[in-house]
Amino acid sequence: MASATTRHPRPPSHSGLGTFAELPDWLVAIVQPMRVRAALAAAIPEFASGQLALLECEISRLRMKNDHWTGIYQLTVAEPGSQPRTIQTQASLIPPEQPAPVQPEQVHAFGTEGWRCYMPELRLLLERSHKEAELPSLPILTDPEQSRFVLEQSMRAAGPRYRDIQIQACIPRVVRNKPGNRCTILYDLTYPADVGQAHAWPDLVAVKTYKGGKGKNAYGGMRALWESPFGSGDLVTMAEPLAYIPELKALVAGPIREEQALKDLLRSALRTGTPQALAELDAVMRKTAIGLAAL
C-alpha cells in the first residue's frame, strides 16, 4: 500500500505588514475631524461667508469596498441666532492614482438634495444622500422645533411620570443612519428651570425610525421586557420604551449612558494582551452571558 504524504502550506510571511506601520497622510487625514472642518470651512461658501457656522464634524462607518473608501460625515451647523442642526453627508475618498471627480454644472446650496463638495487637498468628496427622502419622517425628526413638539406630546402619554413634561428645547443628533431603512437620532433636552428641577425627566432620549413595521415590533418587544421581571435592572440595564409614534414610524426610548462598547473593549484587550486587560474583558463577557441567558 502506497503511503500518502500530507503537504502543509508554508506559513505566510508577515514582513510586508511593516508597510502599514504608518498610514499615508491622504488616508489618515479623512479621519481627523479638525482637518476636515478646516477644509470644509474653506471650500463651502456658506461657511466662508459666515452664513453658517460649522460646529462639529463626526466621522463614522468608514468602509473599504471594491477598492473604494466610503463613510458618513455628520456636520452640525447653525445659522446666527438659531438652534444647531445636523446634516448627514455621504463621503467618498478618491485615491491619489484615480482622477478627481468632475465638478457639476449646477451648484446646489449646502445641505439640499444634490449638493456635493470636493476637497482636493483631502481628495474627499461629500454628497448629500438622495436616499434620505425614502424616510419621510426625517425632516420632522431632525428639525429642533418640530421634534420638540413631537417628543413632548408622545412622552406625555408614556405614563404618570411624564404626564406634565414640558420640553423647552431639544437638539437632534443623527448618530446612525442607513438611508432608506432606519435612522437613530439622539436628542439633548432642556426644560424650564422652574419645572425641570422638580422632576426626574431625562436630559437625553433616543428615537429610532424605520421603514416598514420594524419600529412597532421593536417597541412591542421592549415594552413586554420592561413590564417583565427582566425590566427590574437587576441583571442588565435596558432603555425605557417611552412611546411609539405610528405616523412617523418612530420608537422613543429613554437613555442608557454608554461607558464603552463591547466591541471596543474586545479590540483593545486583544490588542494590548496584558493580563489586566484580558481579565477585564473576561469579567464583562461573563456579565454579557448572564444578561443573554436571562433574556
Image (cartoon, rainbow, N blue to C red):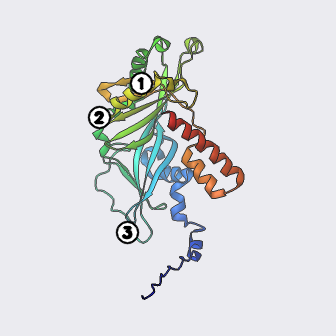
**Is residue 267 rendered to the left or right of residue 77?**
right
Q: Mark 3, residues whose alpha carbon is within 10 Å: few (<14), some, or many (≥20)?
A: few
x and y percentages locating residue 66 in the rendered image:
37, 64
Query: Residue, x 68% and y 48% (percent of image)?
Result: 279
Return the residue found at the far bottom: 2
Query: Residue, x 51% and y 45% (percent of image)?
Result: 57
Q: Secondary structure at mark 2?
A: loop
Q: Which mark is residue 99?
A: 3
Circle nearer the viewer, 3 or 1:
1
x and y percentages locating residue 65 in the rendered image:
39, 61
Question: Mark 2 sits on what residue?
Answer: 136
Q: Mark 2, residues whose alpha carbon is within 10 Å: few (<14), some, or many (≥20)?
A: some
x and y percentages locating residue 240 in the rendered image:
48, 25
Label located before the other in sequence (2 or 1): 2
Label located before the other in sequence (3 or 2): 3
* Residue 107 appears in the rendering: yes
Q: Quadrant of residue 274?
A: bottom right
Q: Which mark is residue 224?
A: 1
* Residue 82 appears in the rendering: no
Q: Say what amino acid the circle numbered 3 marks.
A: Pro
**Is residue 99 rendered to the left or right of residue 34?**
left
Residue sitting nearer the eye, 9 or 85: 9
Return the residue found at the far front: 1
Residue sitting nearer the eye, 201 or 217: 217
